[in-house]
């Protein structure tokens, strides 16, 4: 069973517009959420995170929103740039006890067209 | 500022051979993770070390896989009697403390022929 789901395998947007990437989770014990960006043949690069005690976290062009009741989070990129084209992974973990291992979705491939 | 490093970056081997990968975490990061990523999937957790102690292993880590972190610094992941299904990107990540972000290395891409 997939505990973290990214239902859109791909997304295409125009440069300068908003990109919205979505993620759903099923495990109510998850309390820390992250977004990673990945280029082919490279490791994931950390983008932004959010704790379950918050509903929004912003860092420059990137904002993550968390809706705990819906078990849903989203990443907004405004404005989108061609260099943002990559695969974006949503990840979740339980921070209370244990390894805090990350559980990843399958990723969404974002293409930003000039 | 050096990030997580992994060696080798690429490995091609024949089925049945043994392979070993190395991960050097960010300095002072006492928590280290191994993940595996196959095509079209997100990374999947394999194992976790806190200092030299291996505290958690995934069911994905069969008996052919072994990981060590002998002095609490670098770690090795060995796969014995490789199978074609072992072909994947093997990722290492480290973090400083509880609640902190995990930072990933560039990965080792393994191809088993």
Image (cartoon, coloured by chain):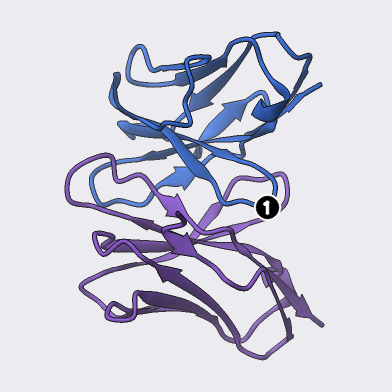
Classify residue B12 as left or right of residue B42. right
Q: Position of residue A72 (x, y in %)?
A: 39, 76
In front of the other: A57 or A34: A34
10 Å crowding of disc 1: few (<14), some (14-19), many (20+): few
Does residue B60 appear in the picture of this structure? yes
Residue A35 % position (x, y): 48, 64
In the image, what residue occupies the spot 50% across and 65% down?
A5
- Tally of numbered tags: 1
From the viewer's perspective, tell me whether residue A41 is left or right of residue B4: right
Image position, residue B24 (x, y; %): 48, 26
Query: In the image as oriented, which residue stretches furthest toward the bottom?
Result: A17
Name the image quarter holding the C terminus of chain B.
top right
Q: Position of residue A113 (x, y in %)?
A: 80, 81
To which residue does mark 1 refer? B40
Chain ID, mark 1: B
Q: Quadrant of residue A13?
A: bottom right
Q: Residue at x 68, y 29 (%)?
A: B85
Chain shown in blue: B
Q: Secondary structure at mark 1?
A: loop
Location of residue B57 with respect to B93 vertically, above or below: above
Q: Residue at x 42, y 31 (%)?
A: B59
Which chain does purple denote in the image? Answer: A
Residue A59 seen: no
Q: Is residue B54 above or below residue A57?
A: above
Q: Quadrant of residue B83?
A: top right
Q: Residue furthest front?
A: A1
The residue lying at 57 percent from left, 86 percent from top is A78
Location of residue A98 by image quarter: top left
The residue nearer to you, when weighing B45 against A42, is B45
């Amino acid at each position: 069973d997939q505990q973290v789901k990214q239902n859109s395998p791909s997304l295409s947007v125009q440069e300068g517009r908003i990109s919205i990437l979505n993620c759903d989770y099923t495990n109510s014990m998850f309390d820390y959420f992250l977004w990673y960006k990945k280029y082919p043949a490279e490791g994931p690069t950390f983008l932004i995170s959010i704790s379950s005690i918050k509903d929004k976290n912003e860092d420059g062009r990137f904002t993550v929103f968390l809706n705990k009741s819906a078990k849903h989070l989203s990443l907004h990129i405004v404005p989108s740039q061609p260099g943002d084209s990559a695969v974006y992974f949503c990840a979740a973990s339980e921070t209370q006890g244990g390894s805090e291992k990350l559980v990843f979705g399958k990723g969404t491939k974002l293409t930003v067209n000039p | 500022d050096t990030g997580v490093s992994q060696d080798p970056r690429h490995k091609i081997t024949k089925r049945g051979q043994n392979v070993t990968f190395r991960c050097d975490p960010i300095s002072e990061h006492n928590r280290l993770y191994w993940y595996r990523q196959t095509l079209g999937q997100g990374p999947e957790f394999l194992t976790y070390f806190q200092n030299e102690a291996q505290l958690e292993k995934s069911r994905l880590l069969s008996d052919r896989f072994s990981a060590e972190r002998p002095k609490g610094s670098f770690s090795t992941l060995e796969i014995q009697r490789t199978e074609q299904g072992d072909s994947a990107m093997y990722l290492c990540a480290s973090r400083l403390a509880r609640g902190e972000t995990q930072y990933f290395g560039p990965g080792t891409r393994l191809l088993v022929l």
